[in-house]
Amino acid sequence: MKLPKRKARCHHFYCLAMALLFMSSTASADISLRLAEDIVLLAENGKAINKKYSPVKDNKITLKNGINQLLVHYNAEVEVDRELGYETTDTFVITFGSENKALTLSVPLIESIRELDKFNKKPKWKLLDNQGQTVETKVAVLKKAGVQLRRDYAQELQAFNQSDSIAAVKQLAIPKITIASTAPLPAGSAPVTVPTSTAPAVSALEKTKEVSIYTLMYWYEQASPEVQAQFKKLIKE
């Protein structure tokens, strides 16, 4: 009579072990996010996406549980002068919180420049879970003045996340420190705060050189293989 009891006890311990294993694996699960076609992920949680080593595979990306911040734009196929072509929306910051869910990010159908402009003014990004339930998002445009050829999304997001935008995530921004001074401050003035980054200051001349290099790289990438070969030959000479 004792043998059946031992089997029942072993079975009980086995079930308990499997339950604990399942709970452990569930607790450590992540968020699976699928991007609708033509949505381009530019940055994830403050880090710019490297196209060669993109974490996006088959329009899917795995994110950590909790608060996540994405930088995206959408390539819409629209009709211009009776011809179809691709136009890109503004660049948007999307912040949301979720845990252990499969999510899908999508946009409404955009078929004209008018609809594209309307979307840029009133963006309707839709984030749904696998039950079809809407996941709350906070959306804002990441604006940049001037030429848009090359953008440093990581640097732009640092500044953005220090702002008061509803989509900003303070934890992703470089913390600021206050510089103490023994000298009395003038009336009405406030302590100076600076980022804790140890990067050296960039002079105006260095910035000009950086812009020139970016411009040169852009036109090199646009050139034909023959022109690129000629360019390489000129550099060697």
Image (cartoon, rainbow, N blue to C red):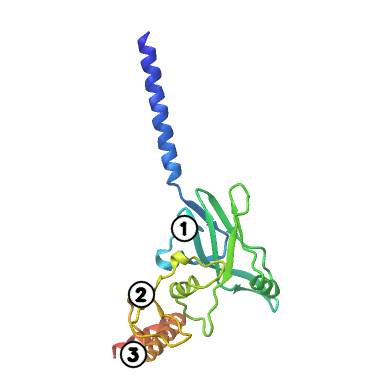
Crowding at dot 1, Cα within 10 Å, few <14 / some 14-19 / many 20+, comes out as few
Compared to 23, does 60 lie above or below? Answer: below
Of badges 2 and 3, nearer the viewer stands 2
Tag shown at residue 197: 2
Compared to 7, does 125 lie above or below? Answer: below
Q: Nearer the viewer, residue 29 or 117?
A: 29
Quadrant of image for the C terminus: bottom left
| 76 to the left or right of 228 | right
Q: Residue at x 45, y 72 (%)?
A: 158
Q: What element carries label 3?
A: helix
Q: Distance between the residues labelled 2 and 3?
A: 39 Å
Where is residue 44 shown, x and y percent of the image? 46, 64
Q: Distance between the residues labelled 1 and 2?
A: 32 Å
What kind of residue is marked 1? Lys
Q: Quadrant of residue 194?
A: bottom left
**Disc 3 target residue:** 234
| 203 to the left or right of 167 | left
Tag shown at residue 57: 1
Which of the two discs, 1 and 2, labels the residue nearer the N terminus? 1
